[in-house]
Image: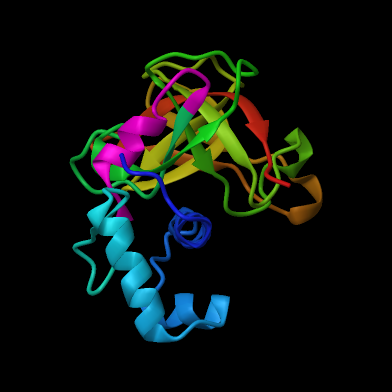
Amino acid sequence: MKPLTEKQQEILKYIESRLEENDSPSQREIAAHFGLAQNSVYQLVSYLKKKGYLDDSSIHRGLKLSKEYLDQTKKSGYLPVIGRVAAGLPILAQENIQEYIDVGQTFGRTSDSFILKVAGDSMIDEGIMDGDFVVVRKDSEIPNGQIGVVLINDEATVKKVYIHKNRIALEPANKAGGYKTIYIKNINEDVQIVGRVTGCFRKL
């Protein structure tokens, strides 16, 4: 891939950070953030597309990171950050990958590991805060009491998982918050155990 200028790198990193929040920025928003004319942003984004870093998203006037750029960052120490999962797609499908984060050797490296960003404070007693990132090792079985990720109607939730014969219990870890354990009866195809949480970190 062709190298980027300093300004192009700044624009790319900003777009990556917005995509991390599931929020593809418009060119007007990029222009306002950097104090640039919209025509200048149009040219910068065009260069990022031509150089293979960005693609147009299916979302109206949206942007996404190109497969080529994501593949380039897919190397030792990097794990994929997964966004909201569309119905019927495997959670590690290329379509769900927003970016890659370099975690070094801290959490190990397997082809079945990935990262999810946490939304909410239901697990703060376990040191998992709103906005943190959790490393997940994909597995359809989780030992009772372990923190895991469960997909419910295409929404991923992080909880302590207890699997019983006829139901799954998802237990929060925030005594002060008044959260209650979620019980899921009549387990069906709308509920999927995704994997076990093996680590947690936050960006500074």
Which contiguous range is marked in magenta? 64-78
Q: Is residue 67 magenta?
A: yes
Q: Position of residue 12 (x, y in %)?
A: 45, 56
Q: Residue at x 39, y 27 (%)?
A: 74
The colour scheme used to paint the residues is rainbow
Most distant residue in the right direction: 176
Q: Is residue 40 above or below residue 57?
A: below
* Image quadrant occupied by the N terminus: top left
Q: Position of residue 32 (x, y in %)?
A: 52, 83
Q: Residue at x 46, y 55 (%)?
A: 5
Q: Residue at x 32, y 48 (%)?
A: 154
Q: Position of residue 160 (x, y in %)?
A: 59, 30
Foreground residue, 194 or 182?
Answer: 194
Locate residue 5 relative to residue 92 in the image: left or right: right
Locate residue 189 relative to residue 71 in the image: left or right: left
Locate residue 11 relative to residue 128 in the image: left or right: left
Foreground residue, 17 or 155?
Answer: 17
> Is residue 176 in sight in this rendering?
yes
Quarter holding residue 133: top right
